[in-house]
Amino acid sequence: MNVYGALGLKVGLELHQQLNTKSKLFCDCPTELRDDEPHVVFKRFLRPTRSELGAVDEAALLEYEKGKAYIYQAYVDTTCLVEMDEEPPHQLNDEALDVALEIALMLNAEIPDVIQVMRKVVIDGSNTTGFQRTAVIALGGPCSAIDDLEGPVRVQTICLEEDAARKISETESEVVFRLDRLGIPLIEVSTAPDIKSPEQAQRVALRLGQLFRVLGKVKRGLGTIRQDINVSLEKGAKVEIKGVQELELISKVVELEVQRQLKLLEIRDELARRGVSDVDSEIVDVTQVFCNTKSKVVSQGIMKGGKVMAVRLTGFAGLLGLELQPGRKFGTELKDYAVAWGKVKGIFHTDEMPAYGISASEVEELKRVLGCGPQDAAVFVVDEEDKAGKALKAIVRRCKDALNGVPDETRAANPDGTTRYMRPRPGASRMYPETDVRPIIVTEDRIKRLRELLPETPEQKLKKFVEKYGLSRDLAQLMVNSYNLNLFERIVSSIPQASPIVVATTLEYTWKSLKREGVPIENIKESSLLELFEALAQGSVAKEAIPEIMKALAERPEAHVSTLMDELGLKTMSPKEVQDVVDRIINDNRDLILSRGDKALKIVMGKAMSMLRGKVEGRIVNEIVKERIAQLLRSGGR
């Protein structure tokens, strides 16, 4: 048994993928994002509602207690009253439902006879309604599993739901959302907790992504696919990690969450050894301790009318500085709770003091006022009394949880694979039926029609790319895994003269290289790429010019390729024009060539390509340079 098996690691995935439909899920608005100034701006406050059983979801309650106002930006031509929650939703988008059903068929899932849209309470402002509309499209049956070398991973549910509004900015008092993304159809595939290692989690996510892409009806680009990961250890807890956008980050997120839970279990065991059975909840005003402090942060907070509020953490001395994940300590977790529940900017604790201008004598006085013993830590917050009190109460609750090990919670993924606290895990009380959308009957004829339209499997595409298009197996595998998979197939099928190898290397290697350089490559339109490869197939442009033209297309998406080729001087030169350039270079370097012979080829080639790069293929330049140098050497320079 490997180390993860010994720990009882269980991982489940939730993959969310935007569908590339003509319109949104519950209205006829287009599924396009906007960056221009909005036409309409309005403000809302959201409040939690009780479930049919009278319960209030804890996650929704946290969002409500933040007390924020939500500002919404809309457009009169691409958003409508449905997104503003001023009009009931229309019937579920048939095109989106067909795509979701096709994915269910590809995964051998069990499709119900009737599909019922549900409401899921979400009051973080990302939905104007205060809930997200979602529908279970299929359930995992006995044959619905993803094969993997570490064992099959069962599919649990496949849902079709509306994407949330796009966050534009956030301050302490309000959040600005744009409604262009709200309502874009989103498919969610959830697996059972059958995944046994970080590497398996990444492989399963890759496989699901392949199925999405071979279907050819999903959006591509950053933010169009998001992965949530549920991680638990036998002695730990179930933790939901939201918003992992990069596939390559999945294994690292799981690995670091395992590390975090193991460290929290160490803290639990150490607290037990110290005999800690409870955490003091008395919050004390210690402003007087810092009345003459040299700390700018503390003094400025007091001058603004704030107070210094503190709490003793019995038995926690030395534990707040323990690193749980790279760059993140237990004290960082406490800060996350304080920020989420109290809206404060940060906290101070005695494991990291004296520091920040706080003197050793102030630390000692703080401990004296709080009655701290040698094994006790102290935490204090400088802010308005009410906010500081809420922050410290959240810290006390989190420290009480530490006595039991790992708390159930929802966390957000950071770009480096670490995670931060978001909110409590939601409960079942936040789901209830959507009464404004009629249930949908799934007929046998519909299933039969969709089954006949199912695409090739990833394995079939891999074989075709190698045998029909001549790609190497490695390049073919990269294309099967690529977000540009369907774009590749559309280009090579639309332009028979185009080289599949050049198209594939452009969409894989050139695309990624330009993206790493910061080029907004996602701006390039498919029609522009078709025009570019058409010009390449006709010999109007050299393949060496592709990166420069793509850069220009990314900056000017509306421009024609032919126009950019003229502006950049990248139209292909004729062999006669190339020969004239080479002859001038050879004539200017006659003595060097005659003295060094064939060894001068590299020098001449470098000079020629510096003048001709992007205007002619390097292969052609090389042939002409070789031929003209050979002629000069045969003639002895005469």
Image (tube, rainbow, N blue to C red):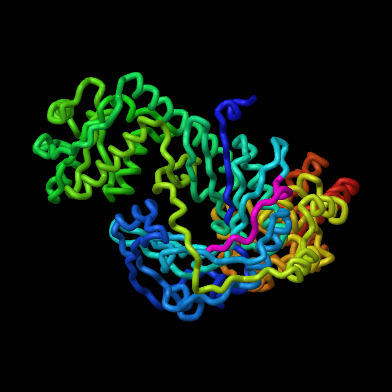
Specify the farthest residue to the right.
634
In front: 229, or 173?
Answer: 229
Q: Where does the image place residue 156, in percent across and percent down from the top left?
A: 62, 50
Q: Is residue 98 left or right of residue 415?
A: right
Q: Is residue 418 left or right of residue 603?
A: left
The number of callouts visible is 0
In front: 466, or 30?
Answer: 30
- Is residue 628 visible in the rendered image? The answer is no
Q: Where does the image place residue 616, in percent across and percent down from the top left?
A: 76, 60
Q: Residue at x 46, y 45 (%)?
A: 414
Q: Residue at x 54, y 63 (%)?
A: 134
Q: Where does the image place residue 348, in percent across and percent down from the top left?
A: 25, 36
- Give the dominant element type of the magenta stretch: helix, strand or loop: strand
- Is residue 233 visible in the rendered image? The answer is yes
In the depicted structure, whether residue 373 falls above or below residue 261: above
Q: Which quadrant of the figure has residue 419?
A: top left
Q: Residue at x 71, y 40 (%)?
A: 148
In the depicted structure, whether residue 39 falls above or below residue 382: below
Q: Where does the image place residue 622, in percent across and percent down from the top left?
A: 80, 51
Q: Is residue 136 magenta?
A: yes
Quarter holding the N terminus is top right
In front: 363, or 516?
Answer: 363
Q: Which quadrant of the figure has residue 573?
A: bottom right
- Magenta residues, as a range? 134-146
Specify the farthest residue to the bottom.
77
Q: Residue at x 15, y 36 (%)?
A: 294
Q: Is residue 454 magenta?
A: no
Q: Is residue 383 left or right of residue 191?
A: left
Specify the farthest residue to the front.
53
